[in-house]
Image (tube, grey):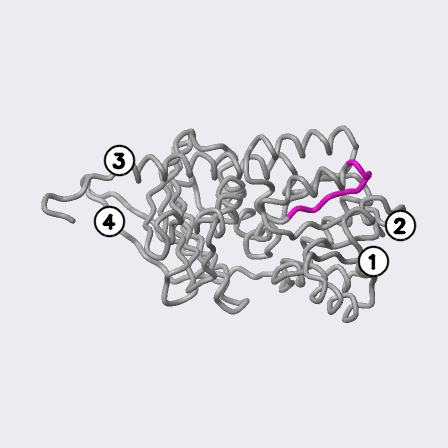
Amino acid sequence: MPNVAVIGCGGWGRNLVRTFHRLGALKAVCDIDAERGQSISSTFGVPLCDVEDLVRSAEIDAVVIATPADDHASVALDALRGGKHVFIEKPMALTVQEALTVRDAGNRAGRVVMVGHLLQYHPGFIALKRTVEEGTLGRIQYIYSNRLNFGKVRKKENVFWSFAPHDISMILSLTGEMPVSVETHGSYYLNRSVSDVTTTHMRFPNGIDAHIFVSWLHPVKEQRLIVVGETGMAVFDDMQPWPSKLLFYPHRVDWRNGEPELKSAPGQPVPLEEEEPLLRECRHFLECAATGIRPVTDAEEGIRVLEVLSRSEVSLERKRSEAIPMAGAR
């Protein structure tokens, strides 16, 4: 089993530390906050090291990067130069060019580069994708996703970059294509330069439309992905208990005398294997590092998500600059 070091032990980094420790792979941790790093080190019984020592260490095979997003690319490049396999939390980088540089460095080094798009490893999403691929829903027409909560507000990263990478990753996986158009509208309430609410519409070459709504100013937490097909619909709702996380609705539309007639049916639970997505994700990284197989969420997948994020950002800024106030507005 590869020996792993986690760099960045903040909110999500601590979960990665816990999971790799559970899998028996954790050998070291690193954090810019010395007090926090020492606490994590003591709790999990592994040494606290600095980044330079980790990337030079012959005892460390792979590093997991959970630092602030603007450090992801530089830390990944240092680790790859040190011959380490790399797991990078989302987003992979802040620009497509940075991500391409990381991908190329991984290819040259012959090392695995994996991106932490967690929901690709969720049993509910895996079952949903299988349902789509088997044709249970018929031809897919529309996908929409809501990722809403009250917080956590960020000062530099807008809500789309913070919340939407998971949704983009799932939608691109379901459609199997890159969108031909991306249009995003944003609203700014707490900070005039950082959007708190965004709606994004994507159109794909195969005719599928997709919609993403994200907000950190929402009264209740919601994490729901809905897929609408010609012969059925599916709802993946991660806020529900396991028996109800994925429901299949065999709704259909019949035509009589040129008029649509809606036929609804009760939702049918889809059986799922109950397992923590993060455990699956971390185990997959260890398998890829040990065998050299390509991760489900590899560097190419991370780059595709970044391309959509970047196109969305351009649209967001254009819409903001083109906004025309109503007559009399102040």
Sequence-wise, the earlier of marks 1 and 4 is 1
Sequence-wise, the earlier of marks 4 and 3 is 4
> Badge 2 is on which residue?
59
Whether pointer 1 and pointer 2 mark residues with C-beta atoms closer than 8 Å, the reply is: yes
In the rendered structure, the answer to whether residue 183 lies left or right of residue 295 reads left
Q: Secondary structure at mark 1?
A: strand
Sequence-wise, the earlier of marks 3 and 2 is 2
> Badge 4 is on which residue?
261
Task: Measure the alpha-carbon separation of dots 3 and 1.
Answer: 52 Å
Nearer mark to the viewer, of 3 and 1: 3
Q: Position of residue 36 (x, y in %)?
A: 69, 66
Q: Position of residue 176 (x, y in %)?
A: 52, 35
Total numbered circles: 4
Which residue appears at 28% of the width and 46% of the height? 254
Task: Measure the alpha-carbon separation of dots 1 and 4.
Answer: 61 Å
Sequence-wise, the earlier of marks 2 and 4 is 2
- Which amino acid lies under the numbered mark 2 shown in the image of this protein? Glu
Residue 195: mark: none
> Badge 3 is on which residue?
322
In the rendered structure, the answer to whether residue 194 lies left or right of residue 117 reads left
Whether pointer 3 and pointer 2 mark residues with C-beta atoms closer than 8 Å, the reply is: no
- Which amino acid lies under the numbered mark 1 shown in the image of this protein? Lys
How packed is label 4: few (under 14 Cα within 10 Å), some, or many (20 or more)?
Answer: few
> Badge 1 is on which residue?
27
Up the image or down, 302 lies above or below 3; here it is above
Task: Measure the alpha-carbon separation of dots 4 and 3.
Answer: 41 Å
How packed is label 2: few (under 14 Cα within 10 Å), some, or many (20 or more)?
Answer: some
Sequence-wise, the earlier of marks 1 and 2 is 1
- Which amino acid lies under the numbered mark 4 shown in the image of this protein? Glu
Task: Measure the alpha-carbon separation of dots 1 and 2.
Answer: 9 Å
Region in magenta: 81-88
